[in-house]
Image (spheres, coloured by chain):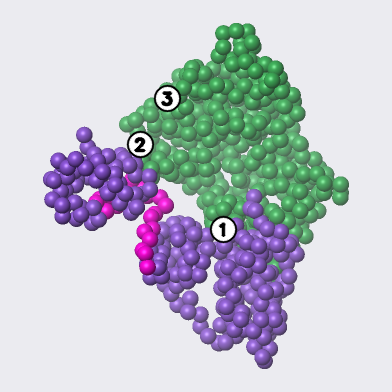
Amino acid sequence: MWEYTDKVQQHFLEPQNVGEIEKASGTGDVGSLACGDALKLTLEINADDIITDAKFKTFGCASAIASSSVLTEMVKGMSVDEAAKVTNEDIADALGGLPKEKMHCSVMGREALEAAIADYRGLILPMAEGNVVCECFGVTDLEVIRTIKESGLRSVEEITNFTKAGGGCGKCEGKLREILQETINETTDAPVSVKPKRMTALQKIKKIEEVIEKEIRPGLVKDGGDIELVDVDGDFVIVSLLGACKSCNKSQTTIKEYVEKKLRELVLESLIVEEEN
Amino acid sequence: MSSLNDTVVYMDNNATSMVAKEVVDSMMKYFSESYGNPSSMYTFGGVVGEAISKARSQVADLLGCTPDEITYTSCGTESDSTAILSALRSYPEKRHVITTRVEHPAVKSLCENLEIATGRKYRVTRLKVDSEGMLDMAEYEAALSDDTAIVSIMWANNETGVIYPVEKMARMAKERGILFHTDAVQAVGKIPMSLKDLDIDFLSLSGHKLHAPKGVGVLYIKKGTLFVPFVTGGHQERGRRGGTENVASLVGLGTACALAADNLAEENGRVRDLRDRLEAGLLSSIPEAILNGHKTSRLPNTTNISFKYVEGEAILLHMNRYNICASSGSACTSGSLEPSHVLRAMGVPFTAAHGSIRFSLSVYNTEEEVDFVLEKMPAIIESLRKMSPFWKE
């Protein structure tokens, strides 16, 4: 069972502002039946740009309904400019928090609000113009990038929790990782490496080969040494040190402190590197 | 009716079941009174060994086999893994497994691991199902090959209750010299079985689905079948499964199997009637509700109904206000983002898959409970539909 806060339960069991405003000033329609949740938000906005009424219709789970309900309560009385600044984190906070797997419900609320405001202003949403990354849930790269930045996401799993991207067939996992890596590099000074959560044996071996070739060998060659990948057996990576490294009495340190550290950092945390006997 | 508001209306017996009072009574003695180790040399341990033997006979009687074909395990999942991995180790040259697209995660995940974690060393054929959840025998026959090590087909599906023709499928496998395993976790106690007359080599069952405690299971291994243990250790279970016996639970499982044999007629009589009453009532009182799964080739206790345009978790949480317990195949209840793999394999449209609710009854349910559910459900569905942007009055 999900751990929902009292606030979520309250808004789910007694949702506020259910319905649809006739002749709405702005309408936001997001999500779909296939996706498992959808929200239609209608706003009434007066001549002073103040939101005087908000109503919703939602298809979805308890947190989707609660997010919609609390959102309508929040924006009533706000100016359109103020409402445009509401983030998914604000919606989740107003509910006393959401389980992390359910954060996408708050994102849906923010998206509907944005769409309704854009409709009111007669604008086209920039998010809809991006390229679709996740075909299962129709999520674009622009939406992913924005959520990474806004919520400080650091893993593909988090991207899935917040945007649903990658939660279907999983084929876009690689693409999501690239976007995450690029977005993090762009926003922070120290690049963080993003590792895949699961790899097939083949992917693992390929990646190990790649890292040895590009990241490890150049450093050793500079010192007159060399390295060869002998075998990969589960998490055990068997290598052979050549050239100057072979006779070096620090070879064990090289293996553990340099090769293993690099492979763990760039391929998989669980790898153990050993020298061929 | 309001009196029921304070008590739990439990209709989720395919998830787990109440431990029967008779079962608890039979177990108590083996905690602090007769707590000896059955492997010990003294009488204080020996009597415990006798109790386990008696339980083994009770399990064998329910399955229609001999006690020496029964190996105790910790759960249905362990039994499934043991059977399939044993077949692959017994015939290392064979690299193919046949299963279905609607298996329980216990078999489904194992098969995925066989493909992916071994770097595609094994090939898995997953048989398709039609819109009623039934298999295509021609597809099955064509899939059987000399490379097939084992076939693993569930006897009855946990989500829809659909029953598969495992007797016939086991015979077809046997004719080709291929081992056959069935996950019968949902079927045991609801379908009469006589394994001595069938070509099934392995069968898994789980205690907690038939009113025994959680943490105890059985793997039936047909006499003469090649077997390689999964959990090795001591000589328990004649070397087929190491580890000190879960004595009290095994005794409880024996009692539960004896009870299940006595209750088979009631399951297929009174419980079926209750299920039919619930199903017919829901389908007639709630518009746009559809039954998932074959109408007749089905367990007597299970009904899986989709309420279109509403979402399962929301339905369950409203039912929870009345202490009505059931399950959903919606994405949100599983923590994944996609609805049940079983319903998707059957081609149930998304409009319906997200709003599926499974009711699974037991001999402990009453007519009054069924009527209580029938009274509450229409309003729950209606209130959620009023909120749904897809619902048109």
Q: Which residues are magenta?
A: A189-213
Amino acid under disc 2: Arg
The colour chain A appears in is: purple
Pick out the residue farthest to the front: A249
Please identify the quarter of the rendering in which residue A185 is found.
bottom left
Give the residue number, with chain letter if any, for mark 3. Answer: B228
Q: Which chain is green?
A: B
The x and y percentages for residue B175 are: 42, 29
Q: Badge 2 local density, few (<14 within 10 Å), some, or many (20+)? A: some
Give the residue number, with chain letter if any, for mark 2. Answer: B95
Numbered mark located on residue B249 in the image: none
**Chain assignment, label 1:** A
Mark 1 or 2, which is nearer the eye? 1
The x and y percentages for residue B281 are: 76, 51
Give the residue number, with chain letter if any, for mark 1. Answer: A100
Circles 1 and 3 in contact, beta carbons < 8 Å: no
Marks 1/3: CA–CA distance: 42 Å
**Chain assignment, label 2:** B
